[in-house]
Image (tube, rainbow, N blue to C red):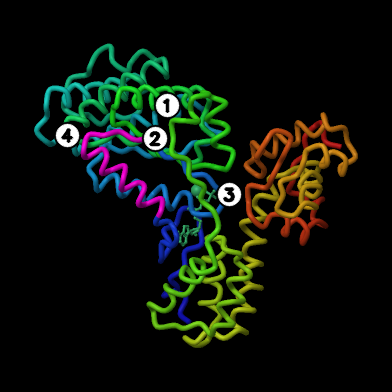
């Protein structure tokens, strides 16, 4: 079939042709809107899951909803490699200034004018953008340079002003586990105070499965501040819809066996469904998709995944880190005990630490619990098994302690 009509969307955060299986989360978010609109409070939202399950897509969908509710919204993506707190604060200020411009054109209550002034002074302090909101800076608000104080003042002024209109202030944070601890602590503290004071301020976050732990380690009360939702694989029916419906809307049909072949290969993972869907569309000569097309698509799709999704991660690992990944792969999708991994690598348990830390910081593994490690990417164990001969792949850079 024609590639230019291909409806599937493998990629990071790309909106799928059919947003499947997230009704519970979207309804919960709509409930939050309704509570805000009636002046009642609720908790923030934390979405967690492995790579490629659709966290960013869902977060973006909630962001779009929040915009349509006329909340004041700002969206940031945390990165480990960025210059930490300053970069994040600048991104926050820039986003806030941009979304406040709409508000600045409406008739402003004095509280709202003050809130825009606080946003402006926060922006002036971090030097994010030259945009102006046409209000006076609120001197002495959110401009001390101390992350916690400034974020608290910002949240207080902005959410109280929005509360007058029965709207909320929403901060959307993707990859939150990578946020520097100072900003993370400041944001959690702000959410905490907002919950206590009934200020309509909400953090809506997405991240890896270890995010709840990172949050609680940063501030122990974080446990009770958020509505935690695990985003996972699709059920067989949901996966079938994600694959079938976009094609059928364009007049194509799957032979039942063909659908089964693809569903087995994708194992319910949204990213894999998009990848195999894209492959089967491009490889099928006719609008009726035969089992043989599906078999070819699985082969092609797997090669695509191996060459991109998995390989890009594998290449980030050094030779010794790859040995650790291999040792983990013996447990399939895991998790693995770090002690057992050390045994398999024939090193002391204490020597695993640096490799583990490096792989976590590269985003390849996470610690589901103390003394455990697991892959962040579904299917990584299978990839490692298929490609373990590539352990010496020259692209892995070595570190001095490498053995
Ligand atoms: N609800 C859904 N229905 C169908 N496809 C989806 C759904 N959610 C996500 N996808 C598809 O899955 C893929 C991965 O989505 P997304 O980038 O949001 O995952 P993620 O969990 O944020 O991954 P990462 O941890 O790597 O950032 C995309 O190709 C997207 O189109
Ligand atoms: Mg994502």
Gap between marks 4 and 1, in whole Å?
A: 23 Å
Q: How packed is label 1: few (under 14 Cα within 10 Å), some, or many (20 or more)?
A: many
Residue 386, image quadrant:
bottom right
Mark identifier at residue 187: 1
Q: Earlier in the sequence, mark 4 or mark 3?
A: 3
Is 21 in front, or is 93? 21
- The residue depicted at 41 percent of the width and 58 percent of the height is 15
- The residue depicted at 58 percent of the width and 71 percent of the height is 263
Q: Disc 1, ligand 2: is the CB inside 8 Å?
A: no
Q: Which residue is mark 3?
A: 50
Q: Earlier in the sequence, mark 4 or mark 1?
A: 4
Callout 3: helix, strand or loop? loop
Evaluate if marks 1 and 2 touch, with contact meaning CB atoms under 8 Å apart: yes
Q: Is residue 266 magenta?
A: no
Is 255 in front, or is 126? 255
Q: Disc 3, ligand 1: is the CB inside 8 Å?
A: yes
Gap between marks 2 and 4, in whole Å?
A: 19 Å
The segment highlighted magenta reads 24-42
Where's residue 229, x and y in %? 48, 45
Q: Earlier in the sequence, mark 3 or mark 2?
A: 3
Q: How packed is label 3: few (under 14 Cα within 10 Å), some, or many (20 or more)?
A: many
Outermost residue, right direction? 346
Q: Is residue 40 magenta?
A: yes
Q: Disc 2, ligand 2: is the CB inside 8 Å?
A: no
Q: Earlier in the sequence, mark 1 or mark 2?
A: 1
Callout 2: helix, strand or loop? strand
Callout 4: helix, strand or loop? loop
Mark identifier at residue 165: 4
């Amino acid at each position: 079939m024609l590639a230019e009509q291909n409806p599937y969307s493998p990629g990071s955060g790309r909106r799928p042709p059919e947003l499947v299986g997230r009704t519970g989360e979207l309804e919960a978010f709509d409930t939050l809107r309704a509570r805000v609109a009636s002046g009642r409070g609720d908790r923030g939202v934390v979405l967690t899951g492995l790579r490629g399950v659709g966290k960013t897509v869902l977060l973006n969908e909630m962001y779009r909803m929040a915009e349509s509710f006329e909340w004041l919204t700002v969206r940031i993506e945390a990165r480990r490699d960025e210059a930490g707190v300053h970069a994040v604060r600048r991104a926050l200020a820039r986003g806030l200034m941009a979304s406040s411009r709409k508000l600045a054109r409406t008739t402003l209550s004095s509280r709202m004018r003050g809130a825009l002034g606080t946003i402006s002074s926060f922006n002036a302090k971090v030097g994010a953008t030259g945009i102006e909101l046409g209000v006076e800076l609120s001197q002495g608000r959110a401009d001390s340079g101390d992350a916690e104080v400034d974020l608290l003042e910002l949240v207080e002024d902005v959410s109280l002003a929005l509360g007058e209109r029965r709207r909320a202030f929403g901060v959307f944070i993707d990859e939150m586990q990578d946020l520097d601890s100072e900003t993370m602590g400041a944001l959690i503290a702000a959410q905490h105070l907002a919950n206590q004071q009934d200020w309509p301020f909400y953090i809506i976050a997405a991240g890896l499965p270890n995010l709840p732990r990172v949050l609680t380690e940063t501030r122990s009360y974080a446990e009770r501040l958020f509505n935690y939702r695990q985003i996972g694989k699709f059920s067989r029916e949901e996966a079938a819809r994600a694959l079938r419906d976009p094609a059928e809307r364009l007049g194509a049909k799957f032979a039942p066996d063909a659908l089964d072949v693809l569903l087995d290969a994708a194992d319910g993972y949204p990213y894999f469904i998009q990848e195999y869907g894209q492959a089967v569309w491009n490889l099928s000569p006719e609008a009726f998709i035969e089992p043989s097309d599906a078999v070819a698509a699985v082969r092609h799709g797997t090669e695509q995944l191996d060459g991109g999704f998995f390989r890009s991660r594998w290449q980030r690992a050094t030779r010794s880190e790859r040995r650790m990944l291999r040792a983990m792969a013996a447990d399939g999708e895991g998790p693995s005990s770090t002690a057992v991994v050390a045994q398999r690598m024939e090193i002391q348990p204490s020597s695993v630490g640096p490799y583990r830390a490096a792989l976590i910081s590269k985003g390849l593994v996470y610690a589901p619990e103390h003394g455990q490690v697991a892959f962040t990417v579904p299917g990584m164990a299978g990839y490692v098994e298929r490609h373990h001969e590539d352990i010496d792949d020259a692209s892995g850079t070595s570190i001095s302690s490498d053995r």
